[in-house]
Amino acid sequence: MENEAEMTGVPARRPMKKSPTAIGNHQLSPETMMMGFGFDPGLSEGSLKPPIFLTSTFVFDTAAHGKRFFEGITGKRPGGAEGLVYSRFNGPNQEILEGRLRLWEEAEEALTFSSGMSAIATLLLTFCRPGDVIVHSGPLYAATETLIAKILGQFGITWLDFPSGATGEEIAAVVEAAKAKGRVAMIYLESPANPTNALVDVEAVRAVRDSAFPDASARPPIAIDNTFLGPLWAKPLASGADISVYSLTKYAGGHSDLVAGGLVGAKKFLDPIRMMRNTIGTILDPNTAWMLSRSLETLELRMSRAGENAAKVCEYLRTHDKVESVGYLGFLQEGTRQADIYKRHCTGAGSTFSLYLKGGEKEAFAFLDNLTIAHLAVSLGGTETLASAPAAMTHLSVPDERKQALGITDNLVRISIGVENADDLIADFENALLAV
Ligand SMILES: *Cc1c(COP(=O)(O)O)cnc(C)c1O
């Protein structure tokens, strides 16, 4: 808020101290910056941790300040809000969280939302108009598919998809077909796909997009749902995506105790989305924002431990005689296209995988019903291990044909590994497999 004094001639409150991002030439890592970045205790009674700011509105020093802040909020003046205005637009807890969230992907900005789905809905509403076409990878998170096909479909927006593992040529063919249908509003990806774990070649999508739309000003943005591997094991903005999408409910929140969403990317893409969020009120609440700031302090620890655990558990499961196969990113076969995409886009295999038991629903249910440590619940990315049966639960309403195509068979168990002791988890799975 340096402009305040210059604007009114009155010095404002003491300006916020800048948080360090480097010591000399040494760049600080996100995991270090999560502890205090963007918060100045001196402005909050010396409180080490940010208070939770439960207020619906913010007091302006002068009427001129109020006018200037509104000029920023409404876009009358470029540069955005210079001060806090009203809690549907912004708030200290959300701003601290957004300032930290963006650091993981070295993005210019981040926005947080009341859920992953409200982030996705706000994103799509911002860029799509009647007659437009959305090109997307398939399959997507079920609610995202419903939003695109059923809800946006009511407003004359159509879609075309390509399978997650598609090659550059296959993606280019779908983009060309979409261009023939209407204005391509957005290329929307999700990687890895659930439950196939198929990875999308973001670099190839970027190359196709740039050559299909030579005029840079007419290029549809590339957004990607990075919930499963982000922000630690995949950083799609570095691979050529424009907007990274998060259900912060999962690994970022990490304790299965909140619902939230986030978008990360360059300011030019997030500015119009912020305007949409200001209008429809999909911003995250201060309490959940505070909880998420706390979660981010341990994100690297939690995800690293969960990833190590998953590697050990999958190694155990893959040779068990009651197991048909394990769909885990750490087991991609050398020389395959998926392994090549993995090498170029990922730094870790994650902790969510597909376990195919020998047999069918009876065997999958026996396994699930005999777990002691792992909980029988949908969702992923928490400190505790969760297991579920997609065919009978999350994907119950998917037509049989599509289930078959996606490998959602009755013997499939989806597992998200947490931060427990790996040997305890192996003992739990060993015991449950006895009952199969
Ligand atoms: C959970 C999830 C979402 C939706 O997020 P909510 O926070 O539940 O709204 C979107 N995409 C993926 C990949 C998810 O796992």
Image (cartoon, rainbow, N blue to C red):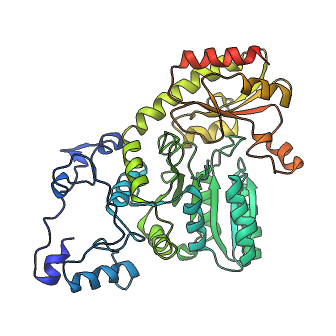
Residue farthest toward the left in the current orientation of the protein? 10
Image quadrant where residue 429 sits: top right
User: In this orientation, which residue lies closer to the viewer: 307 or 135?
Assistant: 307
Q: Is residue 136 above or below residue 22?
A: below
Residue 170 visible in the shown view: no
Residue at 77 percent across and 68 percent down: it is 177
Residue 85 visible in the shown view: yes
User: In this orientation, which residue lies closer to the viewer: 82 or 188?
Assistant: 82
Residue at 40 percent across and 48 percent down: it is 291
Residue at 63 percent across and 52 percent down: it is 190
Point out the image quarter for the N terminus.
bottom left
User: In this orientation, which residue lies closer to the viewer: 177 or 400?
Assistant: 400
- What is the x, y in percent for residue 364? 79, 28
In the picture, measured across the screen, residue 299 lies left or right of residue 415, that is left
Point out the image quarter for the C terminus.
top right
- What is the x, y in percent for residue 149? 75, 65
Q: Is residue 115 above or below residue 361?
A: below
In the picture, measured across the screen, residue 211 lies left or right of residue 56, that is right
Residue farthest toward the right in the current orientation of the protein? 401
In the picture, measured across the screen, residue 39 lies left or right of residue 245, that is left
